[in-house]
Amino acid sequence: MQSLLMSVIILFIFIHYMQGGYSTAFFNDRDFIIKAWSGGMMEVKLGKAAQIQSDNRRVKDYGIMMDHDHTLANDELKSIAENKNIELPDKLDDHHKQAVDKLKDKSGGDFDKSYMEMMVEDHTADIREFEEASTRVSDDQLKKFVKNTLPLLKLHLDSATAILKSLK
């Protein structure tokens, strides 16, 4: 009975980790860097898409902010990864690629609503992950990056929420 319980617990932890959740047992700097890198690349791609596919000035401006801010954040993250000898992927992970693909054929108001909903959801998740990372990462340079990036992510969430409300 005890081994069955242990097997169930291990399976739960494994499933949680595979779904992108961070647990105390599995958190490490490398995984965080790679996931944050892919998320940043997605934000840049979608920010560029917003500048083209939206007709709404606020959404376009938000896209400009995403492109700018996440390019700078990824530049800093790339430097940290290089210092830690972590090779960064040149493509989005499957989760982030699906998000980009979901919006590629939309335009105008349809794009705006879908994009801003995605930005609220994504930045809510990012803030939660960065808050956890702030207590879990071991590298001092990465800790500083997390600490400095969190207020920016919160600003992005507040802006996305306000724009989304204005679209309804």
Image (cartoon, rainbow, N blue to C red):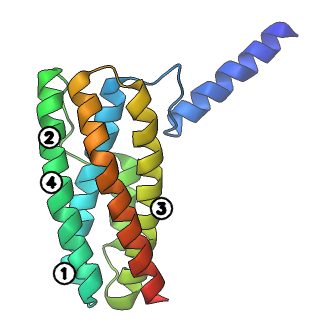
Q: How far apart are marks 3 and 4 (CA)?
A: 20 Å
Residue 3's place in the image compared with 135, above or below, is: above
Point out which mark residue 76 bears: 2
Residue receiving disc 4: 71
Q: Which of 122 and 102 is in front in this view?
A: 122
Residue 55 location (% of width, % of height): 26, 91
Point out which mark residue 121 bears: 3
Point out which mark residue 52 bears: 1
Residue 101's place in the image compared with 56, above or below, is: above
Q: Is residue 16 visible?
A: yes
Q: Residues within 10 Å of mark 2 (few under 14, many from 20)?
A: some
- 7 vs 31, left or right, is right
* Mark 3 or mark 2, earlier in chain: 2
What amino acid type is highlighted by mark number 1? Ile
What amino acid type is highlighted by mark number 4? Thr
Q: Can residue 48 be seen in this view?
A: no
* Mark 2 or mark 1, earlier in chain: 1
Q: Nearer the viewer, mark 3 or mark 1?
A: 3
Q: How crowded is mark 1: few (under 14 residues within 10 Å), some or many (20 or more)?
A: few
